[in-house]
Amino acid sequence: MLYRNILLIDDDIDDADVFIEAINSLDKNVTCLAETNPIKALEFLKSTKILPDLIFLDYNMPVINGNEFIEKMRAVEKLKPIPVIIYSSYSENAAAQLSIIHDTERYISKPNTFTELAALLKNILEEQ
């Protein structure tokens, strides 16, 4: 697996916990950190020496949405190469209509079950 360090940015603590549990069920060699505040996540990314290999980003968050976060992130030179996957409750069709998909590697809808989430994450992590 190419992605060893993953950052999830999602203001829903329960969703973040389930996401981390799903990652941990797949591979113990993958580290997943979660941040519930997008402003704190951006500050963390700017200051950390070890950048994530992949970011999963919720679209609907307080203060700034996913697109605004990506714009701020891409303005920082060292953060530009990090792939971002928008991870949201909108369907892919709704996301396209709302122009949610913005300078990301891809968009995925949040699955309804833990099993679906684990399978989706396994596919993403094994693509590389």
Image (cartoon, rainbow, N blue to C red):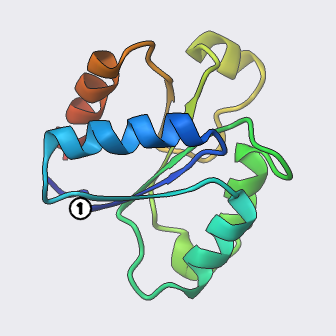
Tell which of 104 and 25 is nearer to you.
25
Q: Residue at x 23, y 24 (%)?
A: 119
Tell me which amino acid carries mark 1.
Arg
Q: Residue at x 55, y 69 (%)?
A: 80
Relative horizontal placement of residue 44, taking residue 26 as reference (left or right):
right
Image quarter of residue 37: bottom right
Q: Secondary structure at mark 1?
A: loop
Q: Is residue 127 visible?
A: no
Q: Residues within 10 Å of mark 1 (few under 14, many from 20)?
A: some
Q: Residue at x 16, y 40 (%)?
A: 26
Tell which of 25 and 72 is nearer to you.
25
Q: Residue at x 38, y 14 (%)?
A: 113
Relative horizontal placement of residue 52, taking residue 122 as reference (left or right):
right
Residue 93 image offset from top left, x and y in percent: 62, 11
Which residue matches tag 1? 4
The total number of labels drawn is 1
Residue 48 image offset from top left, x and y in percent: 50, 84
Tell which of 80 and 4 is nearer to you.
4
